[in-house]
Image: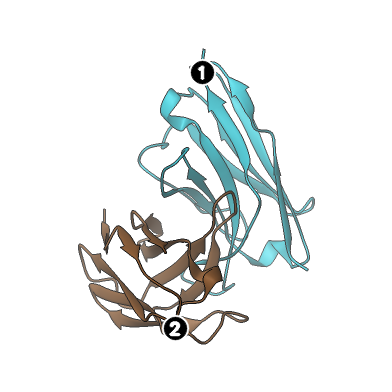
Chain colours: A brown, B cyan
Amino acid sequence: DIQLTQSPSFLSASVGDRVTITCRASQGINTYLAWYQQKPEKAPKLLIYAASTLQSGVPSRFSGSGSGTEFTLTISSLQPEDFATYYCQQLNSHLITFGQGTRLEI
Amino acid sequence: EVQLLESGGGLVQPGGSLRLSCAASGFTFSSYAMSWVRQAPGKGLEWVSAISDSGVATYYADSVKGRFTISRDNSKNTLYLQVNSLRAEDTAIYYCAKDGDPRPPSPYYFDYWGQGTLLTVSS
């Protein structure tokens, strides 16, 4: 099975900061990678798919990049509503795995 | 508006069984693969199972293979998860999730999620 490792697991930042979260796959996954945001007591929300395609309705301050084994999610200027937990997710041979999550706090 | 509404969770004893349901609306249900994803209390997301648009193909995480069965009724726009031989570690919120693209590959990514249903396995 392909494993996803996110770094960091915890990130402290301030409103207006630029932050980057990294997701590394144990094997190459082309661009079969998505990013989600989850707030407490809520279902996850899709931000990015196909590694770099912004989901409709998601603010343009969110961006994704990468292919193969290394991927990044960047928030260009943190807003108060962005403090949440972020997960990467991959597809390989019809099996899905998620990263362990990155908790973004003030 | 896409809506996914899970039901069927509850308290079950170890070794017990339950059937979870997910009622879908607002999209052509029969055109999309669907998945179940769970989240144990205070933990991360774990994909559990997926089913193709027609229901012919099914896929499972190793942790539930042989114990859980995914199915769908496209005439009722409903997704199911039959959970058997339950263990304490199956305690989680179970979300149903819609695939983001009707084209292969599937499952791929999830553009809509339900609010989840809590399954607690305890004696």
- Residue A73 seen in the current view: yes
Residue type at tag 2: Ser
User: Which corner quadrant of the image does residue A21 belong to?
Assistant: bottom left
In the image, residue B3 sits, relative to residue A77, either above or below, namely above
Q: Which residue is drawn at 74% across and 67% down?
A: B28
Q: Mark 2 lies on which chain?
A: A
- Residue B106 seen in the current view: no
Q: Which label number is shown at residue A77? A: 2
Q: Which of B45 and B70 is in front in this view?
A: B45
| Residue reaching furthest to the top | B123
User: Which corner quadrant of the image does residue A51 belong to?
Assistant: bottom left
Crowding at mark 2 (Cα within 10 Å: few <14, some 14-19, many 20+):
some
Q: Residue at x 51, y 76 (%)?
A: A79
Q: How far apart are marks 1 and 2 (CA)?
A: 44 Å
Query: Relative to residue B112, is residue A39 drawn left or right?
Result: left
Q: Which label number is shown at residue B122? A: 1
- Which percent across, then down, holds residue B119? 58, 31
In the image, residue A82 sits, relative to residue B114, either above or below, namely below
Instruction: Assign a secondary structure to mark 2.
Output: loop
Quadrant in which the N terminus of chain B appears: bottom right
- Which percent across, then down, holds residue A86? 42, 63
- Which percent across, then down, holds residue A48? 47, 76
Q: How many labels does the image show?
A: 2
Residue type at tag 1: Ser
Instruction: Assign a secondary structure to mark 1.
Output: loop
Query: Relative to residue B47, is residue B22 drawn left or right?
Result: right
Looking at the rendered image, the disc whose residue lies closer to the viewer, 1 or 2, is 2
- Which percent across, then down, holds residue B79? 66, 48
| Residue reaching furthest to the left | A26
